[in-house]
Image (cartoon, grey):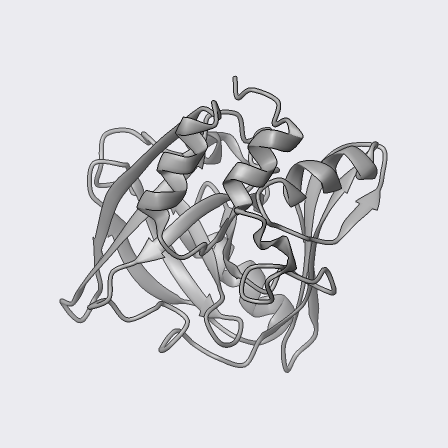
Amino acid sequence: MSQPLSRRIFLALTGGALAAPSISWAAKDAPPLLDHILLGCSDLDKGISLVEEKTGVRAAFGGVHPGRGTQNALLSLGEHRYLEIIAPDPKQSSVQQYSVIKDLTTPRLIGWAVHPGDIDALGKRLRDSGVAVEGPRSGSRARPDGRVLHWKALGLADDRHGLLPFFIQWSADSVHPSTDAPAGCRLEHFGLVSPDPGELTKTLQRFGIDAPVERGEKSQLRARLAGPKGVLELTS
């Protein structure tokens, strides 16, 4: 479990930078540094079909994650953000990451990622401040055209079952997936729901994230995508 962040730790992590426009995020319809949201499903084709049926845009196959047991399809949501539809890869023996997707009867949101900049420095600051993290770990995926994407990911040991984001930094020689994934959809809203929105907002702000948080009976993620055919509402 990660340790609660005191004001001293909070200031150490942010370096007093919450006042700096470069990393002080305004909560409107989505965190400005949102990188992507993950739509989990037990069958990739069904996930692709759901999104296409509602929005009119068909996600393109992205590739597989070797050793992790998953495959994905991608849909651009504008500059530097995208939807990742993720499902088990039947050619791999087991799902090592996001194992919950094997048992999903309907697609649902299972997580989200933000791009914080220097991910190695962030990981060190978090560890030095007593926050339990996993990584940064290197990842890669071969695209259908043969190009290989590389990234580093850093996760919180306690991400509240995907309610809190993980952090990602793409390699300088990798094309961001939003660049050439099928376009035509826009992200109208991405936010969080919690029985205690004040507490969750403070937790997010401790990591420099000022995201929309609404009050609700249970904690969950919510997203609304709009395409030429209509609107798709997603929850976790």
Residue sitting at 34 percent across and 55 percent down?
A: 169
Residue sitting at 54 percent across and 35 percent down?
A: 104
Q: Is any part of residue 236 visible from this angle?
A: no
Q: Is any part of residue 150 visible from this angle?
A: yes
Instruction: Decide if residue 138 is on the left or right side of residue 11.
Output: left
Q: Out of 55 and 82, give the one closest to the viewer.
A: 82
Q: Position of residue 171 (x, y in %)?
A: 25, 60
Residue sitting at 31 percent across and 44 percent down?
A: 120
In the orientation shown, which residue stands out farthest toward the left?
146
Instruction: Decide if residue 38 is on the left or right side of residue 148.
Output: right
Q: Out of 12 and 60, give the one closest to the viewer.
A: 12
Snapshot quadrant of residue 98: top left
Where the C terminus falls, by quadrant? top right
Q: Position of residue 232 (x, y in %)?
A: 68, 63
Q: Position of residue 36 (x, y in %)?
A: 49, 58
Snapshot quadrant of residue 84: bottom left
* Vertical comparison of 141 with 76: above or below: above
